[in-house]
Amino acid sequence: MKTNRAVLALGVGVFLLALDGRAETEIRGLWTAHCSSWRLDSGGRVAMIELRLERATASGRSEVGETLAQGDLGLKTEDLQAPSAEVRFQWARDACTFGMEGTFKSGEGAGHFLFTPSAQYITDMAGMGYPGIDNEMAFRLAVHDVARSFVRDLATLGYEHLPIEQLMSLKIHGADAAYVRGLQGLGLKKLSVDNLIALRIHGASVDYVRQMQGLGFPQLSADELVTFRIHGVDPEFVKGLRDLGLPAQTQEELVTDRIHGVSPAFVKELQDLGYRGVTNDVLVSFRIHGVSPAFIRDFQAVGYAHPSPEELVTLRIHGVSADFVKSLKNLGYDKVAVRDLVSLKIHGVTPEFIERIQQTAGKGVGIDTIVSDKIQGKES
């Protein structure tokens, strides 16, 4: 009798453990979905499902989303577009299967999901150096689709035993084995995980790196590539400047050009106005001080056919405008030298001041005299 009771107790214990194990491996929550249609580059369209999962966690509510092709979920078009249709479908990942059930009404769906991690996935991950993956971690790995093949492929390229958080970051940003292999083939070897993620975040694709190397930048580091991408130094920009006859610029010059807006369009406008062969420093100085094509055209219109770059910058710094020149012309001062224009502005000589001086000294009073009178405080 005691033996039977012991067997019964053992059986109940095993049964309870099984229930506990089942509860531990199951994560439940709610799903919502929205149907849309995406245009393909080939000209066709594909039905897409914007799927969101929401569940309760120890720290509150958690929500994740993914956009998937309708075919990946095995959903029928007639069910998605029906006025009301009960559905059951699965979202399969390497780490798990999400079992879904619920209702679709005219392209909008909602229901409940059950997450069950793959025991084989957890076993294999432990064999690759990631033991003790619990349900929460398995859920995160599944959502981000950190597959065993993804981990193995990175390991063959020198990225083995990475922290799980780094694996997920690499996957989120698309730094997979193909990307790493492509960079390594271009000489960018032994990059840190942070480097890889930064390159992907800022859009430094393998093709981008290849093109920049082909334009004469074969030794760009990961940080330099990121700097180029942040400031918009791309192959089109470099080619555009070179097509206009600018000499090959350094990395620093290209970044400076982008920061200050020295674009091919800006350079082309200057060349059309007669400013060819100006140095990169002059171009940057023009942008810093606001020497625009419009500013130059305005001065050409009032008789200054080709001020030197230095004169243009000086005029801009001291606030000498074409309107100021027109005012001087109206007072009888035509083709005033740039240095005199600047002197007038430096000393605060206005058209009104000149008119007052002319009332007593006559129309022929010289610029030097006007400036001297201003310095001495003579108003009339």
Image (cartoon, rainbow, N blue to C red):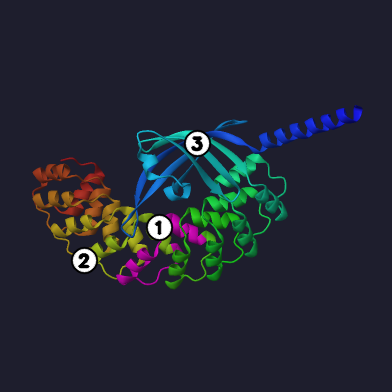
Disc 1 marks a residue whose amino acid type is Gly
Which residue is located at x 45 percent, y 63 percent?
A: 252
Mark 1 or mark 3: name the one nearer the start of the chain. 3
In the image, taking residue 198 as reference, residue 266 lies left or right, namely left
**Distance in Å between CA atoms under marks 2 and 3:** 67 Å
Say which residue appears at 11% left-offset and 53% top-offset.
329
Is 219 located above or below residue 27 in the figure?
Answer: below
Q: Residues within 10 Å of mark 3 (few under 14, many from 20)?
A: some
Contact between marks 1 and 3 (CB within 8 A): the answer is no
Q: Quadrant of the N terminus?
A: top right
Q: Is residue 216 visible?
A: no
Quarter that holds the C terminus: top left
Residue at 49% x, 58% y is 226
Instruction: Locate residue 235 relative to residue 349 in the image: left or right.
Output: right
Please state the horizontal and vertical placement of residue 342, each as a whole percent of the image. Answer: 25, 53
243 within the magenta span: yes
Residue type at numbered disc 3 = Glu
- How crowded pointer 2 is (Cα within 10 Å; few <14, some 14-19, many 20+) is rated as few
Q: Which residue is mark 2?
A: 272
Q: Which residues are magenta?
A: 224-252
Give the camera-side residue of 337 and 20: 20
Instruction: Please name the residue that numbered disc 1 is placed on.
Output: 232
Which sits earlier in the primary sequence, circle 2 or circle 3? 3
Q: Is residue 96 above or below residue 302?
A: above
Distance (Cα) linking label 2 and label 1 = 25 Å
Residue 299 got which mark?
none
What residue sits right under mark 3 in the picture? 101
Q: Is residue 288 visible?
A: yes
Q: Nearer the viewer, mark 1 or mark 3?
A: 3
- Asked if the magenta segment contains residue 77, the reply would be no
